Image (cartoon, coloured by chain):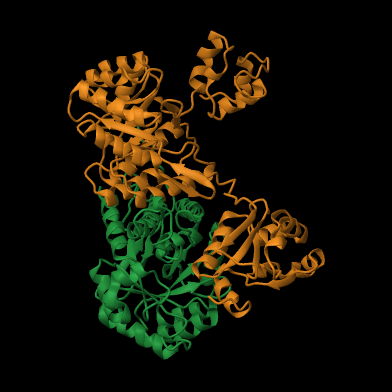
């Protein structure tokens, strides 16, 4: 049975030394109880306590960290089946596949392209996480050369793909101090690969035809001293993959079934074209993958996939907020209107899209409403004349426009008197309640050309 | 090592709802389409029956929509000038259902008349044997005026009339009751508001077997996580036995996806956005797929390539 936070606390040194990164032993104990921390973070715990805590302290799904040269990717450690129950913590890592049968020039070009790929979303830069290098040739030399080529072009973590310990060892030789993922151990080669993973050390992916076979193998591999494992479910059809991924997450989280308490790896491109790969990759983001290896480099797929990953792994308790400030839309001029709204991301997007999509020019002021939508923020006193006056001052918008027209959302028409008092010299207008009506409002009430 | 797979024992199930009526059932559809009936979470066939596959409705308009993306004009070509031809093209592209959205105005700029709406609906019904969803122009008064005329003219067809919202549902529900149709009930991404609207509608006398539930969704990058989680919560509530959530879910990723910049704009965007058409189709189909994984029973899309990709995915998901 898992121990409670208080039970765990009694087994800790109770010195509040903070070496674990938490302010007190009790705080650390609570994190252990919630399976969001690992006991190894405490350097002072006694061997006796360690043994007692071992079963309780490990998260139900292991946290696996791959390390490159400075860059790392963490996956696993998830605690819920549905994001609304709490949140998903560690986004699946996206890895681009290269093959050792490709020439050094081809590999360099592929990696350079993937390395340069980044796309911006709500002020964040989204990018790929690493590379998977597959041995197609079967030659240790060719594999080692491919690993070196990739390593010269990127510092990101790697996944090394071969069933042969000799091939993988040749690649590992060029990755001192790193923690790559070795793919993959099966019934036939697990001993050699486990030894290799332990010695380097590296994480080890495990394949099996069934959940039973996988559970057998992870137990054996753990017995040989490897802790960091990743599971490959096979099952190339979307339904089979979804079913097994769900069963596995339930086993780990609801039954605390340690032999399958590891993150998953998915190869959505296997046997599929770019479109098919993209669909399965989206499913893998929605439902439970830890690592996703992509065969096709297609920006038109990567962009929505990276954004979907960001969305699904957003903490539902902390909605995405826009940075308060001034957002010019369609290169506005000094005589264009100023629209004001709140900094809840969906509110912002609704307004910005309508204005942008209709071709109107406007200065959009995003007011700090602590991430609430217009009506909620108004009701909570987080969107009022003071806050609007504040953002006008902070952004210096008064200096940028010659015609001072401020449009309030229709839902807060009641604020217009207050705002007029706070902002002498501004013409206060009341816009529509819904964003969808903004284009016709701008055309009819503001006389915008578009 | 023996592995005992945890199986959830659900006490509730989603209602089975039939869209469209054949001649034997008082309509003219070649075949009716039944959705819902799930006794487990989406595609978890190992623990409960999933009797009906999610279906793809294709959105068409009563006349060529000037504000739709150039990519959609390119995809549907001349068919867009005639709702009957467009419906046929949609059926040929793999549609399970047709969703006809009436425009607020005709090509002459005047408000759409009930007669024009009826003639578009009749043309579509004549052109295809698929069941039909009819959306009003999303302006309450005009919606009511047009949908009542349509409902009367297509009596017995088991159309789905949309949309009912808390501010405007009475007239649409009344005409659905009087003329043997269904309605779609849209609520703004909130479990309790969805339930409340279903209660208001059933209070008027429309049975639950004739309501589809639209919890509203956002697309990738624009709030999909809210729609996704509300749908998961609604489906969990349904399986746990909450009667007012046990309705099939309908969502409109096509409408949502094709109004965002990523789908609409082909030039002057970052190179990292990639090929315009591929990006737009991905945006629509990945959103649709994610919502299907969260429990959608009917998804409404616009691009023929999305129809194909989403249907392929549904085939794979339904395979045992």
Question: Viewed as shown, does residue A197 lie left or right of A23?
Answer: left
- Chain in green colour: B
Q: Position of residue A326 (x, y in %)?
A: 63, 57
Q: Is residue A15 left or right of residue B201?
A: right
Residue A288 seen in the figure: no
**Residue A236 appears anywhere in the view:** yes
Q: Position of residue A21 (x, y in %)?
A: 61, 23
Q: Nearer the viewer, residue A116 or A382?
A: A116
Q: Residue furthest bottom?
A: B115
| Quarter holding residue A443 | bottom right
- Identity of the residue furthest to the right in this view: A421
Of residues A122 and B138, the one nearer the viewer is: A122
Q: Residue at x 61, y 79 (%)?
A: A447
Indicate whether A310 appears above or below B211.
above
User: Looking at the colours in the rendered structure, which chain would you say is drawn in orange?
Assistant: A
Residue shown at 54%/29% (left/top)?
Answer: A36
Residue B94 appears left or right of A60? left
Numbered marks: total: 0
Q: Position of residue A49 (x, y in %)?
A: 56, 12
Q: Position of residue A268 (x, y in %)?
A: 29, 43
Q: Nearer the viewer, residue B4 or A432?
A: A432
Residue A178 image-quadrant placement: top left
Q: Residue at x 65, y 54 (%)?
A: A325
Between residues A342 and B43, which one lies in front from this camera angle?
A342
- In the depicted structure, whether residue B103 falls above or below residue A99: below
């Amino acid at each position: 049975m898992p121990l409670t936070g208080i039970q765990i606390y009694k087994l800790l040194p109770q010195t509040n030394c903070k070496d674990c990164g938490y302010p007190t032993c009790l705080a650390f104990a609570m994190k252990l109880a919630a399976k969001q921390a690992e006991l190894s973070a405490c350097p002072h715990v006694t061997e006796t306590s360690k043994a007692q805590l071992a079963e309780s302290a490990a998260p139900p799904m292991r946290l696996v960290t791959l390390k490159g040269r400075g860059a790392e990717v963490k996956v696993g450690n998830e605690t819920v089946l549905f994001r609304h129950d709490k949140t998903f913590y560690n986004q699946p890592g996206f890895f681009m596949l290269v093959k050792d049968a490709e020439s050094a020039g081809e590999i360099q070009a592929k990696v350079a392209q993937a390395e340069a790929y980044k796309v911006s979303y709500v002020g964040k830069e989204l990018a790929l996480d690493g590379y998977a290098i597959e041995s197609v040739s079967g030659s240790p030399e060719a594999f080692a050369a491919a690993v070196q080529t990739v390593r010269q072009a990127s510092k990101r973590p790697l996944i090394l793909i071969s069933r042969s310990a000799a091939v993988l060892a040749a690649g590992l030789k060029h990755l001192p101090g790193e923690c790559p993922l070795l793919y993959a151990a099966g019934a036939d080669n697990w001993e050699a690969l486990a030894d290799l993973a332990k010695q380097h050390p590296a994480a080890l992916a495990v394949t099996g035809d069934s959940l039973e076979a996988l559970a057998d193998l992870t137990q054996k591999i753990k017995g040989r001293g490897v802790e960091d494992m990743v599971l490959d479910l096979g099952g190339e059809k979307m339904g089979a993959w979804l079913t097994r991924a769900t069963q596995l997450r339930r086993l780990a989280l609801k039954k605390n079934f340690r032999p399958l308490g590891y993150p998953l790896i998915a190869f959505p491109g296997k046997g599929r074209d770019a479109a098919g790969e993209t669909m399965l990759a989206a499913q893998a983001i929605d439902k439970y993958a830890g690592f996703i290896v992509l065969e096709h480099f297609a920006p038109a797929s990567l962009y929505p996939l990276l954004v979907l990953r960001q969305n699904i792994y957003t903490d539902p308790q902390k909605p995405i907020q826009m940075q308060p400030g001034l957002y010019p839309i369609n290169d506005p001029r000094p005589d264009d209107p100023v629209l004001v709204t709140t900094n809840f991301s969906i509110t912002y997007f609704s307004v910005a899209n309508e204005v942008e999509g209709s071709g109107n020019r406007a200065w959009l002021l995003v007011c700090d409403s602590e991430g609430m939508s217009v009506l909620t923020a108004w009701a909570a006193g987080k969107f009022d004349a003071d806050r609007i006056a504040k953002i006008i001052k902070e952004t210096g918008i008064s200096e940028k426009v010659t015609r001072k027209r401020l449009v309030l959302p229709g839902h807060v028409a009641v604020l217009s008197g207050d705002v007029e008092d706070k902002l002498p010299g501004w013409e206060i207008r009341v816009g529509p309640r819904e964003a969808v009506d903004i284009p016709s409002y701008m055309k009819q009430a503001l006389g915008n050309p578009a | 090592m023996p592995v005992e797979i945890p199986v959830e024992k659900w006490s509730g199930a989603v209602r089975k709802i039939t869209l469209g009526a054949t001649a034997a059932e008082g309509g003219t559809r070649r075949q009716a389409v039944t959705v819902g009936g799930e006794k487990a979470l989406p595609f978890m066939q190992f623990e409960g029956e999933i009797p009906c596959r999610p279906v793809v409705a294709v959105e068409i308009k009563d006349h060529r929509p000037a504000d739709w993306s150039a990519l959609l004009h390119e995809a549907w070509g001349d068919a867009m000038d005639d709702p009957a031809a467009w419906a046929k093209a949609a059926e040929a592209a793999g549609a399970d259902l047709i969703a006809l959205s009436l425009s607020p105005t005709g090509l002459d700029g005047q408000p759409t008349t009930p007669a024009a709406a009826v003639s578009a609906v009749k043309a579509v019904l004549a052109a295809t044997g698929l069941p039909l969803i009819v959306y009003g122009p999303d302006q309450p008064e005009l919606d009511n005026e047009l949908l009542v005329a349509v409902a009367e003219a297509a009596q017995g067809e088991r159309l789905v009339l949309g949309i009912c919202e808390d501010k405007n549902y009475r007239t649409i529900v009344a005409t659905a009751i009087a003329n043997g149709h269904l309605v779609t009930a849209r609520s703004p991404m909130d479990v309790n508001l969805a339930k409340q609207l279903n209660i208001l509608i059933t209070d008027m006398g429309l049975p639950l077997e004739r309501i589809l539930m639209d919890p509203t969704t956002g697309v990738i990058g624009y709030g999909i996580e809210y729609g996704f989680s509300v749908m998961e919560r609604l489906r969990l509530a349904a399986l746990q036995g909450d009667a007012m959530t046990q309705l099939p879910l309908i969502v409109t990723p096509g409408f949502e996806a094709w109004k965002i910049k990523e789908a609409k704009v082909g030039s002057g965007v970052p190179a990292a956005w990639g090929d315009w058409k591929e990006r737009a189709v991905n945006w629509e189909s990945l959103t649709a797929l994610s919502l299907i994984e969260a429990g959608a029973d009917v998804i409404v899309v616009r691009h023929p390539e999305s129809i194909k990709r989403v249907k392929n995915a549904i085939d794979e998901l339904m395979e045992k």
